[in-house]
Image (tube, rainbow, N blue to C red):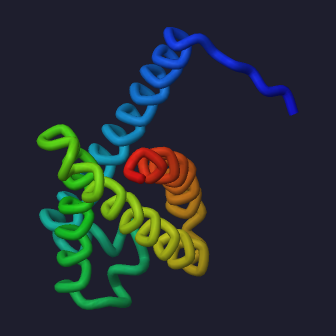
Amino acid sequence: MNTQVFSPARSRLNASYRNLALWTLQGWLAMFFVAAGYAKLSEPMANLIELMRWPALVSENMVRGLGVAEIVLALLILAPLVSWKHGRPLLVTAGAGLLALETIMLGVHALGLETGLAVTNVVLIAMTAPMLWMRAREVR
């Protein structure tokens, strides 16, 4: 394996690029989950059942509760904007919660043969996992 030693300026530049990429991922995840949660809270159940099969299998309160959870986790992903010291642990916790939610929903959509929604969850996992891994390394 090739080991390279960077100058302090180059290391800061790389850290800056990494931070920008992570904030971009966090922003996209927050926008997606705020929108998904809002849809689960505001759309009639008939529309949600037409778009996805699983809402027909659970109570309306569970669907609405999942919408609230998605919005809360999305906002916690952005918690470091308010306070870096207190927001980082919230970000890591919310990232872990979103990753768990995405993994469960991947299984639900895959078992329901909802290919498009399953692929969406794979993309969300591919965005959340590296963001969570890199941000969790910063907390330590």
Q: Residue furthest right?
A: 1
Residue displayed at 57% across by 57% down: 122
Q: How many marks?
A: 0
Instruction: Give the image location of residue 102, x and y in percent.
Output: 46, 66
Is 117 on the left-hand or right-hand side of 110?
left
Instruction: Give the image location of residue 113, x and y in percent.
Output: 60, 73
Is 19 on the left-hand or right-hand side of 73?
right
Res 5 → quadrant: top right
Is 23 on the left-hand or right-hand side of 39?
right
User: In front here: 47 or 59?
Assistant: 59
User: In front here: 124 or 4?
Assistant: 4
Residue displayed at 79% across by 27% down: 3
* Quadrant of image for the N terminus: top right
Q: Is residue 134 above or below residue 89?
A: above
Residue displayed at 48% across by 14% down: 13
Instruction: Give the image location of residue 14, x and y in percent.
Output: 53, 20
Res 57 → quadrant: bottom left
Instruction: Give the image location of residue 45, x and y in percent.
Output: 22, 75
Residue displayed at 25% across by 58% down: 90
User: In front here: 13 or 63?
Assistant: 13
Q: Is residue 127 above or below residue 38?
A: above
